[in-house]
Image (cartoon, helix red, strand yellow):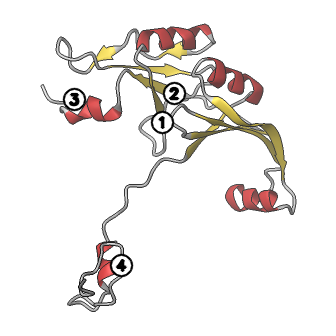
Amino acid sequence: MSTNNVSNNDVSNENTNNGTPAHVQQQAMPYPRTFSHIGISVPDLDAAVKFYTEVLGWYVIMEPSEVVEDPSAIGEMCTDVFGAGWERFRIAHLSTGDRIGVELFEFKNQENPQDNFEYWKTGIFHFCVQDPNVEELAEKIVAAGGKKRMKAPRYYYPGEKPYRMIYMEDPFGNILEIYSHSYELHYASGAYSG
């Protein structure tokens, strides 16, 4: 057996023409990162946990708890993020059916914005869940205190494919969208053409 063959898993010590090690140059392409979790601020943590578990079917992985501004590791970490003076907040950790984490925060001085849908401003203005029965989930959200932002679901390819969507609000004013099918299926066929 020849020892000149190098497997794809071996790290080469050879340099490329520009002096960069070959294994470093191969890693220059960005790796497609996976989505870990999202943080959502709510005015009532217990009500939010109830809504997201009972209506969307997400499950609790860490029960609601309080975090305080103190010299503990978590206290110092939060001060790094929020700055001094945040005092305390309550948090619960949930997970979606596809294992995406959802952190629900109830801050001490939580405020509801005057306009909860300032989509033209930089930042996240909605998140989307997937359910094959868009209409049924939309009605469950309304029955639980949320509301529709559209009269009815819309079709991406009317008369051709069953791909539907609707914008909603949870009972706390957070904007969520419902897709009937995967993100890839909605857009792989050019949803904006025609």
Callout 2: helix, strand or loop? strand
The quadrant in which the N terminus is found is bottom left
Mark 3–mark 1 distance (CA, rounded to whole Å): 21 Å
Q: Nearer the viewer, residue 86 or 145?
A: 145
> How crowded is the residue under tag 2: few (<14 C-alpha within 10 Å), some, or many (20+)?
many
Contact between marks 3 and 2 (CB within 8 A): the answer is no
Residue at point 62% right, 19% down?
Answer: 171
Type of amino acid at the residue the image marks with label 3: Ala
Contact between marks 2 and 4 (CB within 8 A): the answer is no
Type of amino acid at the residue the image marks with label 4: Asp
Mark 2–mark 4 distance (CA, rounded to whole Å): 48 Å
Marks 4, 1: nearer the viewer: 4
Mark 3–mark 2 distance (CA, rounded to whole Å): 22 Å
Marks 3, 4: nearer the viewer: 4
Q: Nearer the viewer, residue 122 or 184?
A: 184
Marks 3, 1: nearer the viewer: 3
Residue assigned mark 1: 125
The numbered mark, 1 or 2, whose residue comes first in the sequence reads 1
Contact between marks 4 and 1 (CB within 8 A): the answer is no
Q: Quadrant of residue 44?
A: top right
Callout 1: helix, strand or loop? loop
Q: Nearer the viewer, residue 185 or 1?
A: 1
Residue at point 51% right, 8% down?
Answer: 139
Residue assigned mark 2: 175
Type of amino acid at the residue the image marks with label 2: Ile
> How crowded is the residue under tag 1: few (<14 C-alpha within 10 Å), some, or many (20+)?
some
The quadrant in which the C terminus is found is top left
Residue assigned mark 3: 191
Residue at point 42% right, 13% down?
Answer: 133
